[in-house]
Image (cartoon, rainbow, N blue to C red):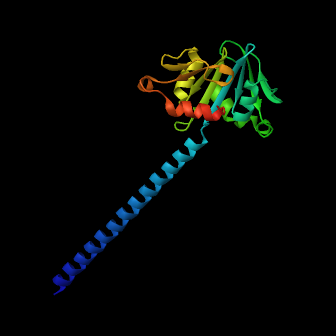
């Protein structure tokens, strides 16, 4: 009888152990899922923090850089930029770089997306990015940071769709693409450019 009780006690302990290990496994899985969700949320937050727009205006030997669309459009139209931060010789060919700033941006210069993009400290947003570079009277338009970065470094773009006289003031517009996009007319980007400039 004592042997039976011992066996029953051992069986109960074994079952209890299995139950506890099951709970531990479930808790471990729950913690793992929570960590995965936190990692996903952090990735989304980081992605959302990446700059989504960037503009350059090459004029009179200077490179003007903007993060604000209205300020950029005003500068392209010839309006004065009231607030700016200037860095002499900071361009790729030792050009002077002028960061056009809004009043709010002038209070937090160190954390501005356009400055970080220009300096290569961050990349543009992977999705929803829009950028323009106005150079030699042409508008170069981008929906991918990698293509814009390559163009900024080399001054050339191997895959483009060019429309003469399609921009404001009959400017030529060049839509820069990557190899995978090179066989399809960039209709959404054209529409975005036209809407952006009210054409």
Horizontal and vertical percent position of residue 65: 70, 26
Query: Which quadrant of the figure contains the N terminus?
Result: bottom left
Q: Quadrant location of residue 14? A: bottom left
Residue 164 in the image: above or below residue 141: above
Left or right of 178? Residue 154 is right
Q: Is residue 68 visible?
A: no
Residue occupying image coordinates x 41% and y 61%: 30
Residue occupying image coordinates x 35% and y 62%: 25
Q: How many marks?
A: 0
Residue that sits furthest to the bottom in the current view: 1
Q: Is residue 41 visible?
A: yes
Between residue 85 and residue 156, name the one nearer to us.
156
Residue occupying image coordinates x 61% and y 29%: 131
Left or right of 62? Residue 92 is left
Between residue 41 and residue 8, name the one nearer to us.
41
Horizontal and vertical percent position of residue 23: 36, 68
Residue 16 in the image: above or below residue 197: below
Q: Quadrant location of residue 22? A: bottom left
Residue occupying image coordinates x 53% and y 23%: 176
Left or right of 82? Residue 89 is left
Horizontal and vertical percent position of residue 11: 22, 76
Between residue 159 and residue 86, name the one nearer to us.
159
Query: Which quadrant of the figure contains the C terminus?
Result: top right
Left or right of 61? Residue 125 is left
């Amino acid at each position: 009888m004592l042997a039976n009780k011992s066996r029953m006690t051992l069986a109960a302990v074994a079952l209890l152990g299995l139950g506890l290990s099951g709970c531990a496994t479930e808790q471990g899985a729950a913690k793992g899922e929570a960590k995965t969700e936190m990692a996903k949320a952090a990735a989304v937050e980081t992605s959302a923090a990446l700059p989504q727009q960037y503009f350059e205006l090459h004029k009179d030997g200077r490179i003007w850089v903007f993060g604000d669309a209205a300020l950029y459009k005003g500068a392209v139209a010839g309006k004065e930029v009231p607030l700016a931060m200037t860095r002499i010789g900071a361009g790729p060919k030792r050009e002077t770089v002028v960061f056009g700033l809004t009043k709010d941006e002038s209070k937090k210069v160190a954390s501005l997306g356009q400055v970080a993009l220009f300096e290569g400290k961050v990349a543009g947003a992977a999705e929803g990015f829009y950028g323009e570079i106005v150079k030699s009277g042409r508008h170069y338009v981008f929906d991918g940071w990698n293509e814009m970065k390559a163009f900024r470094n080399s001054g050339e773009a191997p895959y483009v769709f060019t429309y003469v006289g399609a921009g404001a003031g009959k400017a030529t517009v060049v839509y820069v693409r990557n190899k995978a996009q090179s066989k399809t007319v960039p209709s959404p980007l054209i529409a975005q450019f036209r809407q952006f400039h009210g054409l």
